[in-house]
Amino acid sequence: MSQVTEYSEKVMDHFMNPRNMGEIEDPSGVGTVGNAKCGDIMRMYLDIDENQIVREAKFKTFGCGAAVATSSMATELVKGKSVREALEVTNKAVMEALDGLPPVKIHCSLLAEQAIHAALWDYATKNNISIEGLKPPVNDIDETEEFYKMTSEQA
Ligand code: FES
Protein backbone atom coordinates (compact mmCIF):
# COMPACT_ATOMS: atom_id res chain seq x y z
CA MET A 1 0.00 0.00 0.00
CA SER A 2 1.41 3.39 -0.89
CA GLN A 3 1.81 5.87 1.93
CA VAL A 4 -1.09 8.24 2.36
CA THR A 5 -0.84 11.60 4.04
CA GLU A 6 -4.49 12.47 4.46
CA TYR A 7 -7.76 10.72 5.16
CA SER A 8 -9.23 8.78 2.26
CA GLU A 9 -12.85 9.23 1.23
CA LYS A 10 -13.65 5.90 2.85
CA VAL A 11 -12.14 6.97 6.16
CA MET A 12 -14.17 10.19 6.05
CA ASP A 13 -17.32 8.26 5.16
CA HIS A 14 -16.93 5.80 8.05
CA PHE A 15 -16.05 8.66 10.40
CA MET A 16 -19.05 10.77 9.41
CA ASN A 17 -21.46 7.83 9.09
CA PRO A 18 -20.15 5.09 11.36
CA ARG A 19 -21.68 1.65 10.75
CA ASN A 20 -22.77 -0.54 13.66
CA MET A 21 -22.26 2.02 16.39
CA GLY A 22 -23.89 1.07 19.67
CA GLU A 23 -24.20 -1.90 21.97
CA ILE A 24 -25.43 -5.47 21.76
CA GLU A 25 -27.53 -6.51 24.69
CA ASP A 26 -26.27 -9.73 26.20
CA PRO A 27 -23.38 -10.13 23.72
CA SER A 28 -21.55 -13.42 23.11
CA GLY A 29 -18.32 -11.55 23.66
CA VAL A 30 -17.29 -8.04 24.59
CA GLY A 31 -13.85 -6.52 24.77
CA THR A 32 -12.59 -3.10 25.79
CA VAL A 33 -9.16 -1.82 24.91
CA GLY A 34 -7.36 1.45 25.32
CA ASN A 35 -4.42 3.20 23.83
CA ALA A 36 -2.07 4.24 26.59
CA LYS A 37 -0.48 7.00 24.49
CA CYS A 38 -3.56 8.97 23.52
CA GLY A 39 -6.02 7.64 26.10
CA ASP A 40 -8.58 6.62 23.47
CA ILE A 41 -10.88 3.71 24.29
CA MET A 42 -12.80 1.24 22.15
CA ARG A 43 -15.34 -1.38 23.10
CA MET A 44 -16.43 -4.13 20.72
CA TYR A 45 -19.54 -6.30 21.10
CA LEU A 46 -20.01 -9.55 19.17
CA ASP A 47 -23.07 -11.74 18.75
CA ILE A 48 -21.90 -15.19 17.68
CA ASP A 49 -24.24 -18.03 16.70
CA GLU A 50 -24.01 -21.74 17.51
CA ASN A 51 -21.93 -22.37 14.38
CA GLN A 52 -19.36 -19.85 15.60
CA ILE A 53 -20.34 -17.30 12.96
CA VAL A 54 -20.37 -13.61 13.89
CA ARG A 55 -24.00 -12.62 13.45
CA GLU A 56 -23.70 -9.04 14.64
CA ALA A 57 -20.92 -6.67 15.66
CA LYS A 58 -21.24 -3.28 17.30
CA PHE A 59 -18.82 -0.81 18.79
CA LYS A 60 -18.44 2.22 20.99
CA THR A 61 -15.36 4.33 20.59
CA PHE A 62 -14.22 7.30 22.56
CA GLY A 63 -11.43 8.41 20.33
CA CYS A 64 -10.17 10.17 17.27
CA GLY A 65 -11.73 10.09 13.81
CA ALA A 66 -9.42 7.34 12.62
CA ALA A 67 -10.38 5.20 15.63
CA VAL A 68 -14.08 5.68 14.85
CA ALA A 69 -13.55 4.88 11.15
CA THR A 70 -11.46 1.79 11.86
CA SER A 71 -13.95 0.46 14.44
CA SER A 72 -16.76 1.01 11.95
CA MET A 73 -14.91 -0.82 9.17
CA ALA A 74 -13.77 -3.58 11.55
CA THR A 75 -17.38 -4.36 12.53
CA GLU A 76 -18.34 -4.50 8.85
CA LEU A 77 -15.47 -6.88 8.12
CA VAL A 78 -16.13 -9.35 10.95
CA LYS A 79 -19.87 -9.69 10.32
CA GLY A 80 -20.72 -13.00 8.70
CA LYS A 81 -17.27 -14.43 9.35
CA SER A 82 -16.39 -17.45 11.45
CA VAL A 83 -14.54 -16.69 14.69
CA ARG A 84 -11.38 -18.07 13.09
CA GLU A 85 -11.76 -15.73 10.10
CA ALA A 86 -12.62 -12.80 12.37
CA LEU A 87 -9.25 -13.27 13.98
CA GLU A 88 -7.68 -12.51 10.63
CA VAL A 89 -9.27 -9.07 10.49
CA THR A 90 -6.01 -7.38 11.39
CA ASN A 91 -5.33 -3.69 11.52
CA LYS A 92 -3.68 -4.07 8.09
CA ALA A 93 -6.88 -5.59 6.67
CA VAL A 94 -8.93 -2.77 8.18
CA MET A 95 -6.55 -0.13 6.83
CA GLU A 96 -6.59 -1.65 3.37
CA ALA A 97 -10.38 -1.70 3.37
CA LEU A 98 -10.28 2.01 4.23
CA ASP A 99 -7.78 2.78 1.42
CA GLY A 100 -5.04 3.49 3.94
CA LEU A 101 -4.38 5.77 6.88
CA PRO A 102 -1.75 8.46 7.39
CA PRO A 103 1.29 6.97 9.21
CA VAL A 104 0.63 8.93 12.41
CA LYS A 105 -2.80 7.31 12.59
CA ILE A 106 -1.78 3.69 12.12
CA HIS A 107 -1.78 3.05 15.88
CA CYS A 108 -5.49 3.94 15.92
CA SER A 109 -6.28 0.97 13.68
CA LEU A 110 -4.50 -1.31 16.15
CA LEU A 111 -7.20 -0.51 18.66
CA ALA A 112 -9.81 -2.08 16.34
CA GLU A 113 -7.78 -5.28 15.95
CA GLN A 114 -7.18 -5.52 19.69
CA ALA A 115 -10.85 -4.88 20.47
CA ILE A 116 -11.92 -7.73 18.15
CA HIS A 117 -9.40 -10.03 19.82
CA ALA A 118 -10.53 -9.02 23.30
CA ALA A 119 -14.19 -9.69 22.39
CA LEU A 120 -13.29 -13.06 20.84
CA TRP A 121 -11.27 -13.91 23.94
CA ASP A 122 -14.26 -13.10 26.14
CA TYR A 123 -16.48 -15.31 23.95
CA ALA A 124 -13.97 -18.18 23.99
CA THR A 125 -13.53 -17.93 27.76
CA LYS A 126 -17.27 -17.85 28.45
CA ASN A 127 -17.88 -20.87 26.22
CA ASN A 128 -14.79 -22.73 27.26
CA ILE A 129 -13.51 -23.12 23.70
CA SER A 130 -10.16 -22.35 22.19
CA ILE A 131 -9.72 -20.42 18.96
CA GLU A 132 -6.48 -21.31 17.26
CA GLY A 133 -4.11 -18.36 17.17
CA LEU A 134 -6.06 -16.26 19.67
CA LYS A 135 -3.97 -14.77 22.44
CA PRO A 136 -5.15 -13.15 25.66
CA PRO A 137 -5.97 -9.48 25.11
CA VAL A 138 -3.04 -7.17 25.68
CA ASN A 139 -5.08 -4.45 27.19
CA ASP A 140 -8.54 -5.39 28.34
CA ILE A 141 -9.69 -2.55 30.53
CA ASP A 142 -13.12 -4.01 30.99
CA GLU A 143 -15.71 -2.23 33.10
CA THR A 144 -13.77 0.91 33.84
CA GLU A 145 -15.86 3.66 35.30
CA GLU A 146 -13.93 6.06 33.16
CA PHE A 147 -15.25 4.42 30.00
CA TYR A 148 -18.85 4.75 31.10
CA LYS A 149 -18.30 8.31 32.17
CA MET A 150 -16.78 9.18 28.83
CA THR A 151 -19.31 7.36 26.66
CA SER A 152 -22.23 8.88 28.52
CA GLU A 153 -20.71 12.32 28.09
CA GLN A 154 -20.28 11.57 24.40
CA ALA A 155 -23.97 10.64 23.95
FE1 FES B 1 -5.89 7.74 19.80
FE2 FES B 1 -6.35 7.72 17.27
S1 FES B 1 -5.30 9.23 18.36
S2 FES B 1 -6.81 6.19 18.66
Image (spheres, helix red, strand yellow):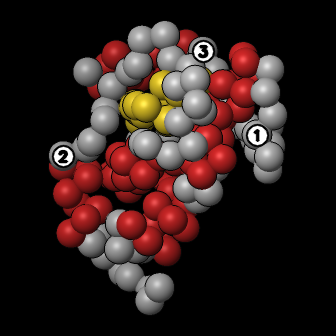
Q: Position of residue 135 (x, y in %)?
A: 80, 43
Q: Which residue is mark 1?
A: 131
Label 3 neighbour load within 10 Å: few <14, some 14-19, many 20+: few
Q: Residue at x 58, y 23 (%)?
A: 50
- Please count the marks in the image: 3
Q: Amino acid at mark 3?
A: Glu
Quadrant in the picture for residue 35 = top right
Q: Which type of secondary structure does the marked residue at label 1 adopt?
A: loop
Q: Nearer the viewer, residue 26 or 52?
A: 52
Disc 1 C-beta below 8 A from ligand 1: no
Tell me the residue that label 2 is attached to.
Answer: 17
Name which residue type carries label 2: Asn
The residue closer to the viewer here, 127 or 18, is 127
Compare marks 3 and 1 and give the one earlier in the sequence.
Answer: 1
Q: Nearer the viewer, mark 2 or mark 3?
A: 2
> Which mark is first along the chain, 3 or 2?
2
Residue neighbourhood size for the residue with mark 2, other residues' Cα within 10 Å, grouped as few (<14), some (14–19), many (≥20):
few
x then y, percent, for residue 48: 53, 27
For ligand 1, tell me if the residue under mark 3 lies within 8 Å: no
Q: Residue at x 37, y 47 (%)?
A: 76
Distance between the alpha carbons at the discs numbered 1 and 2: 32 Å
- In which quadrant of the rendered image does the C terminus lie? top left
Circle 2 SS class: loop
In this view, the residue in front, 51 or 116, is 51
Residue 143's disc is: 3
C-alpha separation, residue under disc 3 versus residue under disc 1: 24 Å
Where is 129 relative to 10, above or below? Answer: above
Above or below, 143 against 108 in this view is above
